[in-house]
Amino acid sequence: MAREDDEMFARLVAVEGLSYQDAWIESRPGPRPERSPAARVQSSRAAKRTASRRSFLAKQKGGAAAPVEVSTEPQALLNLMDEISVHLRRAAELATAHNALKLANTIKQGLVRHVSRQNRIARRVENPGATQTVDDSDVEAMARQILEYSK
């Protein structure tokens, strides 16, 4: 790449996932240009100039995002559920602090449902034979789903 702003444009599109026009606006040196038809034309030209670099960066990003090994160990699930509870509590506190009461109530309702699930999982971990009504494949699917939401 001959120009630094073209490199930044390519990186913003391929890695960050911005649209061509948003990436072009962000990559311009100096004062930030406005969204306009001229900006759309310039962003299309930048997209043509940086096509090979964008495809290289996208492939590089795809290789770096290799699948993560999912741990379905009972204690790992409990630790993850605890971490989610902490984040939900913090989110509810922040919403209350910013006077977003409807949002805070919605988050608190989600927290109550989450804690109920957490208690059911804890009971299964403590006494696996007595309450084991879930197939292991279901537990693994639930663990994957929880990991997806925690990203």
Image (spheres, helix red, strand yellow):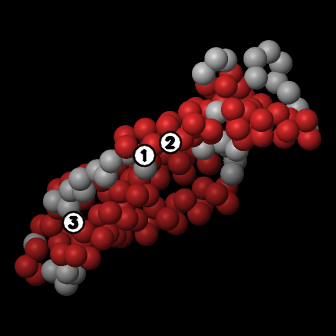
In front here: 109 or 2?
A: 2
Q: Quadrant of residue 143?
A: bottom left
Residue position marked by numbered label 3 in the rendering: 122
Q: Amino acid at mark 1?
A: Gly
Residue position marked by numbered label 2 in the rendering: 58
The residues bearing labels 1 and 2 have C-alpha atoms spaced at a distance of: 6 Å
Residue position marked by numbered label 1 in the rendering: 62
> Which x, y percent locates residue 58?
50, 42
Q: Are marks 1 and 2 in contact (CB under 8 Å)?
A: yes
> Which x, y percent locates residue 94?
58, 44
> Which x, y percent locates residue 33?
85, 27
Residue 94 to residue 103: above or below: above
Which quadrant: the N terminus? top right
- Point 63% across, 26% down: residue: 8
In front here: 103 or 69?
A: 69
Q: Secondary structure at mark 3?
A: helix
Q: Secondary structure at mark 1?
A: helix
Residue 60 to residue 32: above or below: below
Q: Residues within 10 Å of mark 2 (few under 14, many from 20)?
A: some
Q: Amino acid at mark 3?
A: Ala
